[in-house]
Image (cartoon, grey):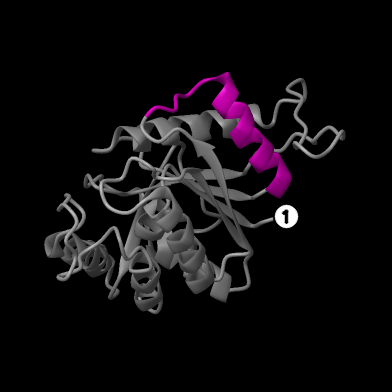
């Protein structure tokens, strides 16, 4: 299956929080989108890897993505090396996306920056013909593939975006996908330990950040991205 967009996150819920609105919008516009989670989030204080699996499946259903896979890297301990890059390369070549959305280049959680670097490196390496890969159930060599663009969504830290996407009509769906992670986020009845993302302030901040980015560009809600190279347009009139 060829995808238009492949969104990759170090943990289940990274994609929903960082670019869930954009994904929902592009799917509504007829684009095919998939999600790859690098880990199962097994080190998360609240919930378990099994509950996170179920939650990520429900979030994918809400967003309407075509496929979601988990590479089962070690949460907290995976590194940006050949072994991990090759696994990501296999996914890039399998789905041949035009655009990759991935973790913030730097962030509070160490996996976010590591995931960002590993995916970015794999996007380049995936285009090299002398790197040979096969899917686990196939003897056929995969064809090289390099995405046209790699964009990094913004996470815990506020990073100045290079561009934003208007998600005004899709904020409700984004939040529904986020709240599919019932064990992760604010629940007044929960008896599990509190974490930096389980309090009401964090959920409010998700809404506020989207409102603030939207305010700056004159819409109700927006999601921001940073880029690795200059974005280009055909005409000045392509810019809003």
Using residue 85 as the reference point, say whether residue 211 is left or right of it.
left
Region rendered in magenta:
77-95
Q: Position of residue 213 (x, y in %)?
A: 25, 62
Residue that appears at 36% across and 38% down: 112
Using residue 119 as the reference point, say whether residue 197 is left or right of it.
left
**Residue farthest along the front direction in this orientation:** 191
Above/below status of 163 relative to 166? above
Residue that appears at 51% across and 35% down: 119
Above/below status of 135 relative to 193? above
Magenta stretch prevailing secondary structure: helix
Q: Is residue 235 visible?
A: yes
Residue that appears at 33% across and 69% down: 179
Residue 85 location, quadrant:
top right
Q: Position of residue 79 (x, y in %)?
A: 44, 24
Q: In the structure shown, which secondary structural element does the residue marked by tag 1 occupy?
A: loop
Is 216 colored magenta in this rendering?
no
Crowd around label 1: few <14 · some 14–19 · many ≥20 (10 Å): some
Residue that appears at 59% across and 22% down: 83
Residue 180 location, quadrant:
bottom left
How many callouts does the rendering have? 1
**Residue farthest along the right direction in this orientation:** 140
Quadrant for the C terminus in the image: bottom left
Toward the viewer: 198 or 172? Answer: 198
User: Residue under circle 1?
Assistant: 2
Residue 52 location, quadrant:
bottom left
Using residue 20 as the reference point, say whether residue 154 is left or right of it.
left
Above/below status of 167 relative to 140? below
Is 89 colored magenta in this rendering?
yes
């Amino acid at each position: 299956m060829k995808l238009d967009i492949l969104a990759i996150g170090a943990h289940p819920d990274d994609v929903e929080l960082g670019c869930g609105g954009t994904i929902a919008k592009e799917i509504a516009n007829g684009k095919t989108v998939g999600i790859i989670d690098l880990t199962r989030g097994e080190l998360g204080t609240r919930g378990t890897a099994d509950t996170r699996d179920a939650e990520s499946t429900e979030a994918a259903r809400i967003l309407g993505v075509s496929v979601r896979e988990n590479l089962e890297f070690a949460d907290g301990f995976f590194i940006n090396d050949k072994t991990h890059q090759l696994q990501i390369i296999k996914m890039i070549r399998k789905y041949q996306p035009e655009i990759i959305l991935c973790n913030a280049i730097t962030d509070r959680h160490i996996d976010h920056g590591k995931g960002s670097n590993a995916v970015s490196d794999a996007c380049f390496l995936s285009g090299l013909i002398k790197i040979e890969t096969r899917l686990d159930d196939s003897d056929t060599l995969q064809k090289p593939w390099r995405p046209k663009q790699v964009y990094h969504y913004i996470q815990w830290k506020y990073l100045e975006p290079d561009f934003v996407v208007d998600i005004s009509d899709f904020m409700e769906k984004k939040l529904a996908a986020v709240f599919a992670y019932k064990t992760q986020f604010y629940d007044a009845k929960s008896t599990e330990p509190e974490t930096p993302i389980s309090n009401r302030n964090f959920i409010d901040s998700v809404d506020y950040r989207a409102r603030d980015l939207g305010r700056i560009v004159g819409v109700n809600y927006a999601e921001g991205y940073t880029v690795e190279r200059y974005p280009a347009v055909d005409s000045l009139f392509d810019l809003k």
